[in-house]
Image (cartoon, rainbow, N blue to C red):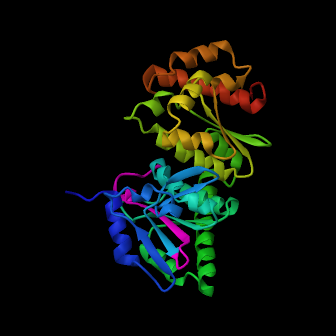
Amino acid sequence: MALSSDEIIKREIIDVVGTSTKKLELRIFPQSSNEDQKLVENGGLTFSYNGVSYGSCDAAWIDRDGNPVIALEGTDALNRKSSGNAQYQRFHHALGAVKNGLLGIYYLKRGIDKIQEDLYGMAYFASLKENGTYLIIDDLEEVKEIVEKYGTPAYDALISSHVAKMKSIFQKKFKEKYQNDWEVFSKRRSTIIKEKFVIKYAGRMKRNFTDGSQRAGHIAVGEMYLTKYYFYDHKFKYLFLKMTSEERDYLDIHKADDKEWYLLRHEHNVEIITMDDILNLPKTIKTKLLSIKDEPLKGDALRIYNECVSAIDEGLRNGKLDIN
């Protein structure tokens, strides 16, 4: 039987990084265990911040006083046809550690696909915004070096070097793809930049969070963190164009413990808004959106959605439409 992504990563961590150094002890659990779901202060691998839990990590390094100092979430996604925004889906797992002022590492084992440059940007901006530092790494030998140098003068320099590398990778791609222009980015990435807030719109619908076969909830969370950290000095209004305020309220009640919906509704400076929150939205456009709100975006539904998006995007940019 083929090993799962989690099991591959956990075995590699033990084999490459080892279980202890003079200063740190590795905390890791077998795939079959649920111990990682406990909060880190209770012996687990889940980090929370301001009452929000950010998902369990694969490993953490604990100092001699019993305090976690480094957290790692890993994936074999690059060998499993995750070439696009699916790579963002586990970004939040190490984020709780970063919010608490620790070092968080998202390790993507090298594979067929490459790491999306967006991930480096997300981690770089999160490192600017949050209390700790977030690193994207594809080589466990680099993790080993970080762990071994913890508590030495070389440690801070090593972390700074990794942050500078992430910044460089992001800036190079941003220049190539968006001409170093956030307005170009905004028009290509369904994003509208206002003075004090940013809007990102998407075709998420109620079913994405109620049907277990749907994966759009995971993607929505990843895109949420990308926008939040790219525009970390703005408030973020995440506009679900195929959802009504009544459906949002339904999810608040019935999916309160769903981890994707929970994160979307509890992330600081992020607000989920719907078609009902668009001021001056013409009735004709709203009627069209309502007609496809439960339909997957393909065929006629996609055509109608694109027509509505074009009008809403233009209206939000020129001020004819606004957000409640």
* Residue 242 seen in this snapshot: no
Q: Which residues are magenta?
A: 63-84
Outermost residue, left direction? 1
Q: 254 or 226, which lies in front?
A: 254
**Point 50% across, 39% down: residue:** 257
Q: Position of residue 281 (x, y in %)?
A: 70, 19
Q: Position of residue 73 (x, y in %)?
A: 46, 61
Q: Is residue 27 magenta?
A: no
Q: Is residue 15 above or below residue 49?
A: below
Image quarter (top left, top right, bottom left or bottom right) of the N terminus: bottom left
Query: Residue 269, located in which quarter of the rendered image?
Result: top right
Q: 283 or 104, which lies in front?
A: 104
**Point 43% across, 77% down: residue:** 141
Horizontal arrangement in the rendering, residue 299 relative to residue 188 (left or right): left
Q: Is residue 64 magenta?
A: yes
Q: Position of residue 184 (x, y in %)?
A: 67, 45
Q: 10 or 275, which lies in front?
A: 10
Query: Residue 123, located in which quarter of the rendered image?
Result: bottom right
Image quarter (top left, top right, bottom left or bottom right) of the C terminus: top right
Q: Is residue 133 above or below residue 37?
A: below
**Point 63% across, 24% down: residue:** 275
**Point 38% across, 55% down: residue:** 34
Horizontal arrangement in the rendering, residue 162 relative to residue 35 (left or right): right
Q: Position of residue 183 (x, y in %)?
A: 70, 45
* Residue 38 seen in this snapshot: yes
